[in-house]
Image (cartoon, grey):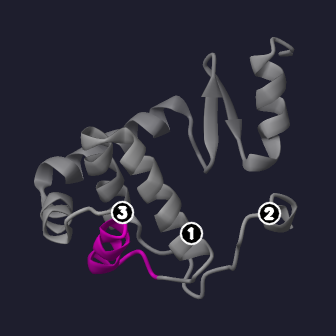
Amino acid sequence: RLGRQMDVPFKLPSRFPIPTQAAARAFYWLDDKNPELARLFAKAAFHAFFAEDIDISNPETVADIAAGLHVKKDELLAAIADPKIKQRLKDENEAAIEKGVFGSPFIFVDGEGFWGCDRMWMVKKWMKGIGW
């Protein structure tokens, strides 16, 4: 319903949930190099998984998605296998847990956490100073 309401293509993937470490590592590697490219990659990976039923647990598939954004596949595959990027993902997850994140999307505004895209109206009110 939310996909239709927000005009976002959505199809429940045939395999769900799946391990997403390859895509998450790719995101953080790209984010360190070019934050805008990382955001484009995130959108492409989500679209591949939730609209096209493409299995993004496979590192090769993740590299193919990034290649569509002119990222060199061999560099991305090497990066997501790098122990430093693996540790970065672990650190980011631990920090999120410490902050109280428990789902996605999870948005913080002024230290206040909001979970779920159906809570965006709350985020907008909070940002306008109409907090409670």
Determine whether 13 is above or below 22 in the image: below
Residue 58 badge: none
User: What's the distance in space between the residues labelled 1 and 2, CA to CA?
Assistant: 13 Å
Mark 2 or 3 closer to N-term?
2
The boundaries of the magenta stretch are 55-68
Mark 3 to mark 1: distance in Å?
A: 14 Å
Q: What residue does disc 3 label?
A: 69
**Tag 3: amino acid:** Leu
Location of residue 114 in the rendering, given as x and y in whole percent from the top left corner:
70, 35
**In this rendering, would 9 be left or right of 83?**
right
**Viewer-proximal residue among 92 and 24:** 24
Q: Is residue 70 left or right of residue 13?
A: left
CB-based contact (under 8 Å), mark 3 and mark 1: no
Q: Quadrant of residue 80?
A: bottom left
Question: Does the magenta stretch mainly form a helix, a strand or a loop?
Answer: helix
Q: Which image quadrant for residue 107?
A: top right
* Residue at the disc numbered 1: 47
Is residue 97 shown above or below 99? below
Badge 3 density bin: few <14, some 14–19, many ≥20, Cα 10 Å: some
Mark 3 or mark 1: which comes first in sequence?
A: 1
Disc 1 is placed on an element classified as: helix
Residue at x 31% of width, y 41% of height = 34
Query: Along the line of sight, which residue is nearer the eye, 85 or 34?
Result: 34
Query: Secondary structure under badge 3?
Result: loop
Q: Residues within 10 Å of mark 2 (few under 14, many from 20)?
A: few
The residue positioned 12% from the left and 64% from the top of the image is 78
Local secondary structure at mark 2: loop
